[in-house]
Amino acid sequence: MYPRIWLITGTSSGFGSELVKEVISRGDKVIATARNVERISHMKDIGAATLQLDVTASQEVLNRKAEEAISIYGKIDIVVNNAGYTQFGIFEENSHDQWFTQFNTNVFGALNTTRAFLPHMRSNKAGVVVFIGSMVAWDGLPALGAYCASKAAIHYAAESLSKEVEPIGIKTLLVEPGAFRTELLNQAPSSRSISKLEDYRTISEAVAKNFDDFNGNQPGDTVKGVQRIVDVVKGENEASGKPWPALLPLGSDAVSTIRNKCEQTLRDLEVWEAFAKSTDI
Ligand SMILES: NC(=O)c1ccc[n+]([C@@H]2O[C@H](COP(=O)([O-])OP(=O)(O)OC[C@H]3O[C@@H](n4cnc5c(N)ncnc54)[C@H](OP(=O)(O)O)[C@@H]3O)[C@@H](O)[C@H]2O)c1
């Protein structure tokens, strides 16, 4: 049964990179993956196996990658869908291709990777699928619509999946972090393009400036973040004895975003409840 075998996507930096180190230090084995496997070759020095994996590859390729990954240690216990990036831009100016590419990585990449490992987990009647979502699933932000929508899509896909696979013995863990100091906002400033349309210029400039100022000052400690994820998956430390969480917010900003949204939704329901119910036959 032990050690357990983890496969993690997008381990060249940030959460993925720290998670590899944490899992190994806690006695489990890891297959670290990245689209450019040379960027993670140093992880072999700490005992990780490495595998090239671009989550936007076709289902056929991902299925073959899953077979290759399973053959390394003979099984996979935990898949962490971590790979992702942030698309900036005003809704009207972001193209279909920009939205599609954002969803192709953050949503379809995670879902297709999961689909590739589910037959193995079903045959074992065990396994954990971790999705790294975001607190932005709860709060659509201006000039960040594609990213927020992608994280909201993962939230509900994970929730639906959990109801299908839990009876089989497979668990899902939806992690929704607040802002953590990773490489996520380290994109070229040109990727935070200012709106060419006068009507959106002020909000677009404000968001770009906020992100530039925020980058490097995010409140979340990535090492502590991955420790909490491993605590929950392994049922250790503060997570020991607690029930499996339907969702795991990480960071005080994530907790307050989710709480504020719930409270606002309840207030809105109170105002509109009778009106909303008035359509019943
Ligand atoms: N940091 C935060 O504040 C925060 C908050 C909430 C959620 N998250 C989520 O946490 C996850 C990890 O992000 P991070 O913050 O650790 O940022 P990061 O340091 O930029 O790491 C993102 C990782 O995803 C990889 N990646 C991107 N596209 C990929 C693809 N098509 N196939 C495989 N790997 C790919 C990147 O690889 P390359 O090096 O090849 O680009 C990189 O290793 C993301 O899903 C992100 O949305 C982050």
Image (cartoon, rainbow, N blue to C red):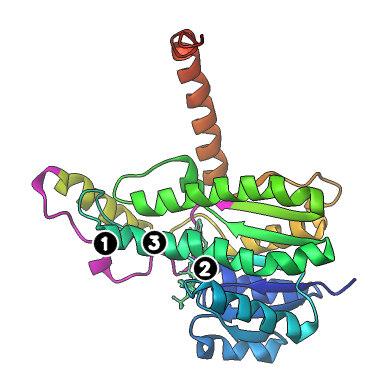
Asked if the residues shown at circle 3 and circle 1 are in contact, with their CB atoms under 8 angstroms apart, the answer is no
- Give the percent coordinates (x, y) of residue 197: 11, 50
* Residue at 79% across, 76% down: 75
For residue 213, what is the image quadrant?
A: bottom left
Q: What residue is pinned by disc 3?
A: 102
Amino acid identity at mark 2: Ala
* Label 2 residue near ligand 1, CB within 8 Å: yes
Q: Please tell me which residue lies in front, 177 or 71.
A: 71
Q: What residue is pinned by disc 2?
A: 83
- Give the percent coordinates (x, y) of residue 113: 59, 68
Q: Is residue 102 left or right of residue 194?
A: right
Quarter occupied by the N terminus: bottom right
Residue at disc 2, secondary structure? loop
Nearest to N terminus: mark 2 or mark 3: 2
Residue range (magenta): 176-199
Residue at far right of view: 1
Residue at disc 3, secondary structure? helix
- Answer whether residue 11 is visible to the viewer in this image: no
Amino acid identity at mark 3: Gln
Asked if the residues shown at circle 2 and circle 3 are in contact, with their CB atoms under 8 angstroms apart, the answer is no
Nearer mark to the viewer, of 3 and 1: 3
Nearest to N terminus: mark 1 or mark 2: 2
Q: What residue is pinned by disc 1?
A: 192
Nearer mark to the viewer, of 1 and 2: 2
From this view, report whether residue 32 is shown above or below residue 174.
below
In reply to whether residue 7 is colored magenta, the answer given is no
Q: Residues within 10 Å of mark 1 (few under 14, many from 20)?
A: many
